[in-house]
């Protein structure tokens, strides 16, 4: 039931986005637009199926990263105190895409992800704008 609801919503969204693309309207920068941009003449069903595959395919990545981070903390307890102090100094800020207030945690998680990659394959997407 939940998969059917998600599929219906993705089909509707893909249809809207494809019509917007045909009308040369500004597009959001998200996964659906990446899928549309990476395929020539993508159908609504293809875009929705690919988006659903990305949703289910990425569902395990965050729990795996957290598991590896906890494992690394157990293996390297010397980092615990510095990470704890940084967290206390931050005043409880939310960890977001900028991570300005938690640079040690950001570095620790990036290094954990580098040393323990949770994906074995990637899908190439065209670069739409300079990085």
Image (cartoon, grey):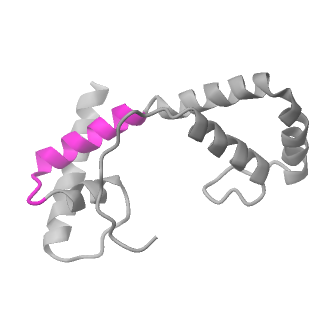
Regarding residue 108, the answer to whether it shows in the image is yes
User: Predominant secondary structure in magenta?
Assistant: helix
Query: Which percent across, then down, holds residue 37?
Result: 23, 62
Is residue 89 found left or right of 73 in the rendered image?
right
Residue range in magenta is 40-58
32 vs 61: above or below: below
Query: Which percent across, then down, holds residue 49?
Result: 20, 40
Residue name at image x 81 percent, y 48 percent: 92
131 vs 44: above or below: below
Name the image quarter holding residue 68: top right
Residue name at image x 28 percent, y 36 percent: 53
| Nearest to the observer: residue 59 or residue 38 | 38
Magenta-span inclusion, residue 25: no
Query: Which percent across, then down, holds residue 35?
Result: 25, 54
Regarding residue 102, the answer to whether it shows in the image is no
Residue occupying the far front of the picture: 115
Name the image quarter holding residue 55: top left
Quadrant of the drawing holding the N terminus: top left
Name the image quarter holding residue 62: top right
Query: Which percent across, then down, holds residue 43?
Result: 9, 52
Magenta-span inclusion, residue 57: yes
| Nearest to the observer: residue 63 or residue 15 | 63
């Amino acid at each position: 039931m939940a998969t059917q609801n998600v599929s219906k919503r993705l089909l509707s969204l893909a249809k809207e986005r494809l019509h917007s693309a045909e009308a040369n309207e500004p597009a959001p920068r998200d996964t659906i637009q990446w899928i549309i941009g990476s395929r020539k003449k993508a159908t609504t069903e293809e875009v929705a199926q690919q988006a659903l595959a990305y949703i289910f395919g990425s569902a395990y990545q965050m729990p795996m990263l957290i598991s590896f981070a906890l494992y690394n903390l157990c293996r390297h307890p010397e980092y615990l105190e510095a990470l704890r102090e940084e967290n206390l100094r931050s005043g409880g800020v939310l960890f977001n895409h900028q991570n300005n207030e938690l640079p040690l945690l950001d570095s620790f998680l990036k290094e954990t992800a580098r040393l323990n990659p949770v994906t074995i394959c990637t899908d190439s997407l065209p670069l739409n704008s300079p990085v």
